[in-house]
């Protein structure tokens, strides 16, 4: 039997990270954990390290680093501080799962691609904010980017199923519609944090769950699809599909549509990104056709959920506009989760920030980081004025 693939899981304590460890545990002959990394979840990191005995554990928070000292198995190196997760990319890993949430994942995305390794990308924010810079890093010999986001993993599989890429007419991303599907804007005025965190079909971290409720997640995924598959915005369509069984589709010029279907289980796209071009032997989320029931599809409501339209606007503007939108959204979602603004204010903050985008190019990492910083500043000012 061939040697197991060495895997680094950065953001190992989150929803994607813990599910990645479940995939590895289900396929122990195939995958081996060599690095783990997170921000500050000391107890869970220590437990994961004892279970997997990696070469390296990386932790961004210095306080968490101090608490972790002495709690790791012998032979595991501890690296601490802002650049610690990037240091972990230097381990013997062949594949890195970037499961960090938000713009904080940009360093990891760039480091993996620059190292010429495979990036299993869950952290969509880095690709959206840093599009042109990430594209350049992706050109590094050996660098591979396989999406973990279920919709993009679906599109990746649909494109593989047909070898005439130039005959793609459109990519169709499915959206569950989130917990507020079917509500009008007036009915969304008083929604609470708990309402926004109650996703009907997926169990995920808090930021992406709120993004799903505003349809910003789908908007970010539209930009992600453009970056991953090089397809124009006019040919990326979003369709609401409440059952989350069809994870996305590709329509060809002859009218044929190829779709990928499974139960909503993130371990499937995670395993796909780890094993590609092979497939794992363990089934995650297989369908029982007798139990599937009707599958519904319909158009998204752009008036009640303006974030989707804002993402198309930012994507079409290009350069640092997606970084501004992403930063505005991260600040607005954090403010909503801290009860500083209402849910209905999230799109308003994003729109207001995007209107003040300064048109800067995304020609370097520094330019992207600067764009993120400026947009966050504008977003905070707008929120302070509201509160
Ligand atoms: N969850 C899903 O099903 C899903 C599906 C598709 C795509 N995604 C994408 O995957 C990413 C992760 O989502 P999630 O739902 O897994 O989030 P999550 O549950 O909130 O986990 C986030 C992870 O990132 C770590 N982290 C946060 N800030 C960090 C920093 N500054 N430096 C280093 N590590 C940091 C956290 O560490 P601590 O625990 O120590 O704070 C945690 O391990 C997001 O980009 C999301 O959009 C998620």
Image: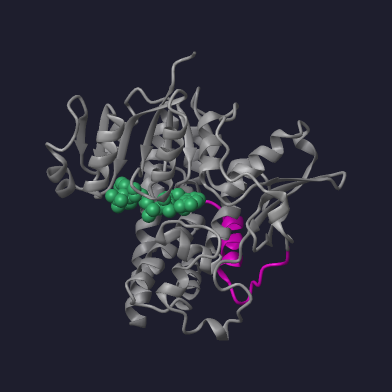
Asked if residue 357 can be seen in this view, the reply is no
Q: Is residue 386 left or right of residue 249?
A: left
Asked if residue 300 is among those painted magenta in the image, a careful observer would answer yes
Residue 36 vs 128, above or below: the answer is: above
Query: At 58% from the left edge and 82% from the top edge, which residue is drawn?
Result: 185
Counting from the top left corner in percent of width and height, residue 174 is at 66, 56
Query: At 37% from the left edge and 68% from the top edge, which residue is drawn?
Result: 378
Viewer-proximal residue among 101 and 83: 101
Residue 247 vs 274, above or below: the answer is: below
Question: Magenta part of the protein: which range?
Answer: 297-319
Counting from the top left corner in percent of width and height, residue 193 is at 41, 74
Residue 333: quarter of image: bottom left
Counting from the top left corner in percent of width and height, residue 12 is at 35, 43
Q: Is residue 62 left or right of residue 177?
A: left
Query: At 49% from the left edge and 46% from the top edge, which residue is drawn?
Result: 127
Residue 103 vs 214, above or below: the answer is: above
Residue 366: quarter of image: top left
Specify the farthest residue to the bottom: 186
Specify the farthest residue to the top: 1
Asked if residue 20 is among those painted magenta in the image, a careful observer would answer no
Colouring mode (rainbow / by chain / secondary structure / one colour) = one colour
Asked if residue 290 can be seen in this view, the reply is yes
Viewer-proximal residue among 95 and 136: 95
Specify the farthest residue to the right: 254
Viewer-proximal residue among 298 and 20: 20
Q: How many marks?
A: 0
The C terminus is located in which quarter? bottom left
Counting from the top left corner in percent of width and height, residue 162 is at 76, 34
């Amino acid at each position: 039997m061939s040697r197991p693939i060495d895997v680094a899981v950065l953001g190992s304590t989150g929803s994607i990270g813990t599910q990645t460890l479940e995939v590895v545990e289900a396929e122990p002959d195939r995958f081996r954990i060599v690095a783990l990394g997170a921000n500050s979840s000391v107890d869970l990191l220590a437990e994961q390290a004892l279970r997997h005995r990696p070469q390296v554990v990386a932790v961004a928070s210095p306080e968490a680093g101090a608490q972790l000292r002495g709690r790791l198995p012998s032979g595991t190196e501890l690296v601490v501080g802002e650049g610690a997760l990037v240091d972990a990319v230097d381990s013997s890993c062949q594949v890195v799962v970037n499961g960090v949430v938000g713009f904080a994942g940009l360093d990891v995305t760039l480091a993996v691609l620059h190292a010429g390794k495979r990036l299993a990308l869950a952290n969509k924010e880095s690709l959206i904010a840093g599009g042109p810079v990430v594209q350049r890093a992706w050109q590094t010999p050996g660098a591979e980017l396989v999406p973990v986001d279920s919709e993009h993993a679906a599109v990746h599989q649909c494109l593989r199923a047909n070898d005439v890429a130039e005959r793609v007419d459109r990519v169709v991303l499915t959206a569950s519609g989130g917990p507020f599907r079917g509500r009008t804007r007036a009915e969304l005025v008083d929604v609470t944090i708990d309402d926004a965190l109650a996703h009907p079909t997926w169990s995920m971290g808090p930021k992406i769950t709120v993004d799903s409720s505003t349809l910003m997640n789908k908007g970010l995924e539209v930009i992600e699809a453009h970056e991953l598959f090089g397809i124009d915005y006019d040919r990326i369509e979003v369709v609401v599909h409440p059952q989350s069984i069809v994870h996305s589709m590709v329509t060809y010029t002859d009218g044929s549509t190829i779709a990928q279907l499974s139960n909503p289980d993130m371990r499937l796209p995670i395993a796909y990104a780890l094993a590609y071009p092979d497939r794992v032997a363990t089934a995650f989320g297989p369908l029982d056709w007798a139990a599937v029931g009707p599958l519904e599809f319909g158009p998204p409501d752009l008036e009640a959920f303006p974030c989707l339209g804002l993402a198309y606007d930012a994507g079409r503007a290009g350069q640092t506009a997606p970084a501004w939108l992403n930063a505005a959204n991260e600040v607005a979602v954090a403010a909503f989760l801290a009860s500083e603004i209402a849910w209905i204010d999230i799109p308003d903050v994003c729109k207001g920030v995007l209107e003040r985008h300064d048109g800067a190019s995304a020609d370097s990492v520094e330019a992207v980081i600067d764009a993120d910083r400026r947009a966050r500043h504008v977003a905070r000012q707008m929120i302070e004025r509201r509160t």
